[in-house]
Every structure is written in C-alpha cells, then in structure tokens.
Image (cartoon, rainbow, N blue to C red):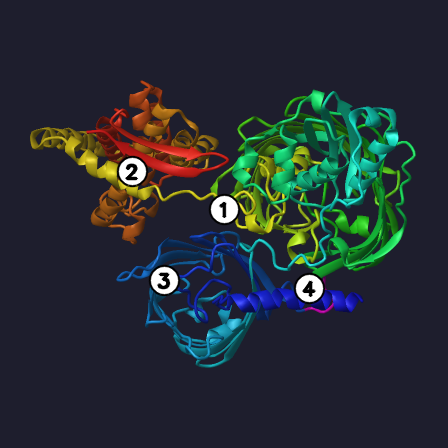
Amino acid sequence: MLRKSIKCAWYGCLAIGGAQAFGATPTIQGQSGYINMPSASVEADGTFSIGYGYDSPYGALWATSTILPFLQVTGRYVSITGIPGFTNDPNAYGSGYGRYKDKVIDAKLKLWDETIWLPSVALGATDLQGTELFKGQYAVATKTFGSSRNLEASVGYGRLRPEGLFAGMRWTPENLPRWSLVAEYDANNYPKDFRAAETFAGQRRKGPSVGVEYRWGWLGVQAARHQDNSSLNAFVSIPFSEREFVPKIHEPSYYQEKGDHRRPSIEEWQHDPAYGAALVEALAKQDFKNIRIQLQGHTLNLTLTNSRISNLGRAVGRATRVALAFAPVDISNIHVTYTKLEQPVATYEFFDLEKLSDYLAGRIPREAFLETVLVRYPNQGDMIHADQEGMLVGIKDTAGLDVIVGRDGEVVQLASEDREANRFKIVPKLGFFFNDPSGALRYELVASSNYDKRLGEGLYLNSALGLKISENVSDVTQPSNSLLPHVRTDVADYKRASRIKLYRLLLNKYATPAERWYVRVSSGVYEEMYRGVGGQVLYLPKDSRWAFDLTMDALQQRDFKGWLGKRDYKTVTALGAVHYRLPYGITATARAGRFLAKDVGVRGEFKRRFLSGIEVGAWFTRTNGNDITSPGKPEAPYHDKGVFISIPLGTMLTSDTQASAGFAISPWTRDVGQMVASPGDLYELMENPRRDMTTIDGLGNFAERADEQNHPAVNPPEHKLDNPWPAMRQRLESSSSALPSAPDALKGIGLAAGALAVASLGDKAIARIAKDHIGSRLSRGLDTFGKTVPLAAVGAAGMALAFGDERMQNTGVVSLQSALVAAGASIGTKYVVGRARPEEERGQWTRATTRSDASFPSNHASIAFAAVTPFAKEYDAQWLYGVAAVGSMGRVAARKHWFSDVAAGGILGYATGSWLWNAQHDNSKSVVSFNAGPGEVGVSWQKTY
C-alpha cells in the first residue's frame, strides 16, 4: 500500500508536468542557457529547478529559482576532480572529505523581454561572494526566430568567467517538441581556473560544443560533446507558480444535510443540551477542534479551529454549513470566530441566513451574498470560554491510536488526536549535514515521539522524545575552533552522547490581551541544546502589510546527554522584528538585538511565497561577533547566512492538509548570529490565516462552488508591482524645460571649474595624510561610512516612495531620479577622463589601468549628493549635505579617490538634484504615487498642465 501511494503521487506530478509541456533550459551550472554559456532567458516566474551536471573536472549539484519574473538565482555545490578537499594523506584529518568543494551563488537579471525587433537582454554575475573561485560577469542578448519560435540564438560578452565573446543556439523540431539540439561557443578560459594545472581544466580550451536535450514534463537531461570531453546534465524543474500539483481526489466532502434532519427552535435548544452537542459532534467530524458554542438571543456564536484545512475562508465555510444545518430555526445571525491555539484570528458575521443558505446552494452570486457578511478582526467579546453552556458534556471522544500511511506527507506515522487537539504522534525524522572536513555528507535518522496536551484555556504542554535509529554525525571528532561561545559548534558532541533524548518539554501559555495583540509565555526545554524561560509579544496593525514582534528568552545550555543536565553557559537573547509584505508575495523581515553567542546585531530575511504556497527565502546576519574562523578573516569576519524552502504538503497530496515540510542550507558549525528554536512563533502562527482574511473579500473558497474556482477571491492573483520606468521617463522628459539657460549654464560651469581647480591644489597633501593614517580605526570607520551613505540615501528615497505621504512620495521619486541620472553621468565621465586612483601610486593625473575603475569623479559622492539634495531642499534639511560630505571624505580616507574627485562628484550630484527638484517639487502639477494594499499594488503618474 505504501509503494502504491507514493507511485500515484509521483506519476500524478509527472503527468501534470507533461501536460504543461514545461520546458526548462538550464546549463550545467543551473542558469538558463545552453551547455556552459548563459542566455538572456530566465525560466517562468516561480520555476524551481534542481539537478546535477558533470563537465570534467567539475561536478555541480545545483538549484535554481526564478524568484522574480526578471531575476534568477542559482546555488551550486561544486566539486573539483583532481584536487583533494583537505589532504592526500589517508590517515590525516580531512582525508574522508574527498574532492575539493566550493559553494557558489550566481544571479541573472533580465533587463527587458524580447520584442518583434529587439532581443531580450540580461546581465549576470557568477560566484557573487565567498571564495569567488568562479567569479565573473556577463551581458547577453537572446532572440527567437521562426513562425513557431523554435530557433533561439544568443550572443554575449563576459569578463573573467566567461572571458570575451560567447554565443549559443537551440533548435527544437516542431514534430519532436521534447527534443532539442544545442550548440555554443564556450568562452571559459579553463587554464585560468583555480589550480587548473592539477586538473583536467588545465588541458581544456575555448571553443565550440554541441549537445542534445530531452525533456518530459518536469524532467530533463542533456548530453554534450566538447572539444576534449563529454558532459551530462540531469534535472527536474517544478513550477512553484502552480496552485497545486495533485488533484484532491481524496478530499472529504463538506457537510451535506440529511433529508430527515429537524432543526429545533430557540426554546428547545435552550432546554435540551443534546441539540448543541449534536452540532459539536458534527463539527468534530469535519476536523474542527477547540469547539465552543453559545446562543445569545437570536445569534449563534461559534469559536473553533480546524486541524486540516489550509484556507481560512474554506474552513469557516464548512463550519458555517454545519452550523446552519443544526442551529435553531428561528435565529437571525451566525458569528464564527476562527482561532489558533484558542487565540482569535478572524470573526465572520452573517446577517441574512436565507441568503447564506442560497449562496451555499449556488442560487445567488457571490456579490449579492457579500452584502450580508462582515469579516473583521476579533475582540475579547467574540471569545467563548470552555464549555460555557455545557455542550461538550456527554460527547465522547473517539480518538484512537492508528497507523497511518502517507498522511500529511509522512511515509508512516502512529497518531492519535482528539477534539481538543490533544495529540500523540510517532514519525521518522531525517536530517542531513553537509561539508564537514571529516566527510562531506552526514545524516541522522530519528524516531520522534510528539505529545501535545491542552491543560487549560490557552495553556499547552508540548513534548518531543527522540530515539536515534542511525546517524554518522558523531563521527566528527575534530573539536570546534570557534573563538565565540560554543552555542552551536559542539553539535557532534550532542549527537554522540545518548541514543534516547528529550528534545522538547515546554509549557506554553497563549493570550490575547487586546485586539490584534498576542502574547506567548514559555518555560522548559526549548530544543536539543537549550532550556529556559521566555516569551513573545506580537502586534498586528490594521494595515495588513505590517507586523511587529518582540521575543526575549533567558537560556541555559543543556548537557550532551539530552535529559535534565546542564552546562555552564547562560545567556539572555532579545530580538525585535518588523515584518512587511511586498508585491510578488515577498515578505521582508528585519530583526535586531542580542543573539545566542551574546553578539549584538541585525538579521535580514526575505522570502517569496508563490501561488502554490511554497516559500523560498534567504537570510543574512551581521553582528559584532568577530568570527574569524575560516573562511572568516580578521579583516573580514564571517557572518551567518543561509537559504531555506518551505513546502505546504497539500500541494502534493490528494487531500488538504496544514502540514508543511521545510529545509534550510546554512553552516551548521557556526556560532555567530545564531537564534534559539522558537517554542511557538506567533507571527508564523498568525501569518497564513491573516493573509487569507485580508485577501480580496476574505472569504476564499468559502462555498466550494464549481462556478467560483476561477474567482479572484478563490484563486487570488499575484500582487505585482507595475513598471515605474514609463512614469519616471515622462517626468524626466517634462523636466527638460527646467534646464538652465545657456548664460546660466556657462556661469555654473565656470564656478564648478574654479571649485575643482582649488580642490585639486589640495589633492597631494590630503592624499598624503590619508596614506599616513590608512588602516587606522578612524580611516576604517570613514571608509565604512562612505560606502554606506549612498546606499542609505537611495534606500531612504525608496522608503519615502513606498510609505510616505504625497509630498514625501514625490520627493522620493525626485531623489531616485537624481541618483540615477547622476550615476549615469558619473560613470560616463569616468570612461572619458580615466584618472588613476590614489591607491595605484601612479601620480595625480595619470591614466587608470582600467577605465571602468577610474577615479574621476567619485560615483559614491555623485549618488550621495544627488539623493539627499531633493530632501534637503524640500524640507530645509541642510544637515543632509554634511552627511553626504562626510561620507564622500570616507572615500578619500580609504585612498579610493582624490579630494578633487569627490568635489566633482558632489557638484555633479548637487546640480542634478537641484535641477530635478526645481522641475518637479510642485507636486500639485506632477505626481508619482506608489500604492500597495491588500487589493492592489501599483505606480501611478499624473501631470497637470
């Protein structure tokens, strides 16, 4: 039975993929392209591909995601045949690691789509950070030809890797749409690769390659022949933008009223608790938990939650059907409050039960029904306390212990759950650990026993006990060399200490002190490594894009055995978080505070939720924890970072479920920027139901009507951000009338030339002072500040555009335009002048080795002054010029620029910002506004003549 269940789900996915003729075109490195060379194409929005490619001497396990319609990001785990990871000595530590391996991040930005006459164009970068062994940049253009557009050709130019001109072509026969022939000119200069003389890369050279591809649904394979070797690439591509991959053929039906069912009157209901008990029992059969019912006058109130149905509106719809069938015949209203862990999330009020019945039966349209419904945030008055009317008395729970195969995505589980969500479950858990010197792959298989018990209103006991079945993490014998407190790096000691462990034993108390305020207090064993006491406060503003929370925990490290013992290390962590929902289903989270190793700093998180509910994200942490263990260095400490994916299993099962599976890839032997496992994160608890409540009308798939499955409230469209460039371009064109007259322009140019002449007189002296103090604390601080100011100024302009009032939005637009124009002018001038930087030690007026890296003028200064000038003028904030000036001097202190470079950049930026502000600051005549809300996202431009 197990084998059959898995086969059905797998072939179902493949069949759907085949029907879509889903054709991904990844290279051996994962980016869209040909064999090794990229194209300007990116896969369809939401496409996630994973595969393995081998092209001697490189093997790459890669994963690629089109995280935005125009942005493709790839992560690669590259092994190099011929180079040992650590040592050739079979007896030395690290000998079991195998080949040299490197983690690589690539990105491709598509600038514009193909038109009838123009090709699509993209810019790309490889190996963006870390060791940068495969670092490179490229620009590429792609055009399709033929009536069926089955011939594609690309040409591009690369720097470093690929190096120079490259090209590629793909032809797909019309009568064989699954097959393609590919050819390319490979411009990689392999002999320049890392330690190429020790590998086959030293023997390879630039030149042509040809290959053949075959695709079937989500699956694809490519075989290619190069001048001196062959390559192979196999992959699977999954369209995350699909709402579900498997039809819900085993989904239980909603409640359907039987013909002989009789509804009582209010008087009968009040005198006979059996009527209410029958309603509770019917709701429990529909997977509802924590059911509370109260009859007040002519209004029937319900509070409940559902343990299985993932969509809030659909769950409330099923509860309302049942309530309508069992409620007293003479009531006027039904109020349903949906809860999570007995905390109210949303309240639905139904004022016209006749229209409710007609809508559920398909007799009236949704628009007519919406006039009789109110969806709102709940308050304390909406909550019904446990068994308030005695309707749970005499209802016997029938929960038993069952062996279940294939439910909630588990291969097999032993589970029991009752009406109050008391739950016992035994499931297998498998974890993987990568890239330790003693072995590239480690694993752990544990039988996890979980018991959750409701002890009182909002009070829960959560526990987890694990039996180790098999693992090899404990084979890691090299002690941690981390200079920080070992908050995570002793993981191998924890894995080898005991076969049976207590992973969690917590008391969690949840409360809602006021509308949209939620509180959790926790005490006990948090996770394998920590125990403690702490809590969290969450606030949800009425603007559903925002959320704020604060988490504090007093923690003590547990001993390796995993029972009640302890270690000496203690700490208090405190993290404040701001969450904001952006277009394209993106949520940005910023955390700041104190982390596990007592390091203080910030953590940024971004995730994209696709239409399927699958989430792909990444995080980056920057703290004052000075982690200099490799690849960290004293001058460049390591900062924690990683990527993650969360998959709602309902998209791949034949029935709905709230269960999800997730994994993250990050260094597992690092101590900097670490957080303790949350006992129950309130934002994660409320995020999905709140999103459902505030999407369109908040009803979702309430009635489960066949004629509504394409309704935007049932299948909400993705909120996208309109292209702001047309509006920007119109404003720039209209600003041309505000350019200074010829006499005024000549006067300004003369003044600027005089200022630059004076500034150049101080170039040598100031450069000498900068050289004498290079590396000092002041110099490093000024350098950091100088790098930050332009980014902060442009970021502030973007924030003003997104969140400000009309005046601030207009100023933000002018600031962004000024920065863009000034940057373009600055870069163009660099190419013309080509002045060498002070750090090159070639003299004040010599030519730069590379014109693109020339010194005059300072691009940082240009952007900084251009971005702050509109705000300084609009709000009379002259101090902003001081910020830009200090930031510009940071570039001089770092010996990146002469003093006259930053003077020229400042003048250019100020002139640009002044011109555009004078032309556009009267926003009553010209307005660009950014609009983002639950129902729409866009940029609008209005011009008054």
Marks 2/3: CA distance? Answer: 30 Å
According to the picture, the residue beneath numbered tag 4 turns out to be 9
The image position of residue 485, as x and y in percent, is 71, 38
In magenta segment, residue 842: no
Please say if 418 is above or below 214: above
Q: Residue furthest left?
A: 743
Q: Give the CA distance from mark 4 to mark 2.
A: 65 Å
Which residue shows up at 55% across the image and 56% down it? 242
Query: Gap in Å between the C-alphas at discs 4 and 3?
Result: 43 Å
Nearest to the observer: residue 506 or residue 196? 506
Q: Which is nearer the N-term, disc 1 or disc 3? A: 3
Q: Measure how far apart labels 4 and 1 are at the Cα level.
A: 27 Å
Q: Pointer 2: residues within 10 angstroms few (<14), some, or many (20+)? A: many
Asked if the residues shown at circle 2 and circle 3 are in contact, with their CB atoms under 8 angstroms apart, the answer is no
Look at the numbered disc 1 and give the secondary structure of its residue. Answer: loop
SS at mark 4 in the image? helix
The amino acid pointed to by label 4 is: Ala
Residue 675 appearing in the image: no
| Helix, strand or loop for disc 3 | strand
Q: Are marks 4 and 3 in contact (CB under 8 Å)?
A: no
Q: Quadrant of the N terminus?
A: bottom right
Neighbourhood count class around disc 3 (C-alpha, 10 Å): few under 14, some 14–19, many 20 upward = many
The residue closer to the viewer here, 229 or 217, is 217
In three-dimensional space, the C-alpha distance between marks 1 and 3, rounded to whole angstroms, equals 38 Å
- Which residue is labeled 2 in the image? 898
- Give the labeled residue for mark 3: 158
Disc on res. 717: 1
Query: What is the magenta range?
Result: 89-93
